Image (spheres, rainbow, N blue to C red):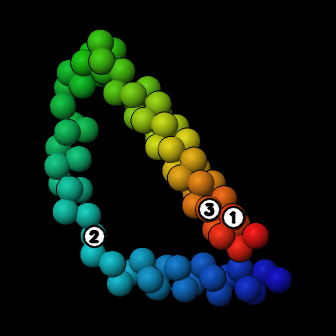
Amino acid sequence: MTWIINKIIEFANYVMSLLPTSPFQPFIQEFADLPYLGIANWFVPIGDMIKVGIAWLVAIGLFYLYSIIMRWVKMIG
């Protein structure tokens, strides 16, 4: 069973190696080196905003997935 997982991981690594790297990586590194970023983050909690945004996107995505499945089941039945 573990060899299947290893093959899947190898395949995923191969596919990821074919994809281009992020064009935003240098900008992210420059932004991370700003000296007052921690102070600004204290006033505007960007990390918490991202967590709430991700939770919202997951909830909306699950809603749409559920509605698509329910429409598909209704068409069959």
- Quarter residue 40 falls in: top left
Q: Which class describes the residues within 10 Å of circle 1: few (<14), some (14-19), or many (20+)?
A: few
Which three-letter amino acid code belongs to the residue tagged 1?
A: Lys
Residue that appears at 26% across and 64% down: 22
Residue 27 relative to residue 6: left or right: left
User: Under tag 3, what secondary structure?
Assistant: helix
Is residue 32 shown above or below 74? above
Mark identifier at residue 21? 2
The spot of residue 24 in percent (x, y) is 20, 56
**Picture residue at 50% right of the left edge, 44% below the top:** 60
Q: Nearer the viewer, mark 2 or mark 1?
A: 1
Toward the viewer: 48 or 61? 61
Q: Which residue is mark 3?
A: 71
Q: Secondary structure at mark 1?
A: helix
Determine the CA span between mark 3 and mark 1: 5 Å
Q: Quadrant of the C terminus?
A: bottom right
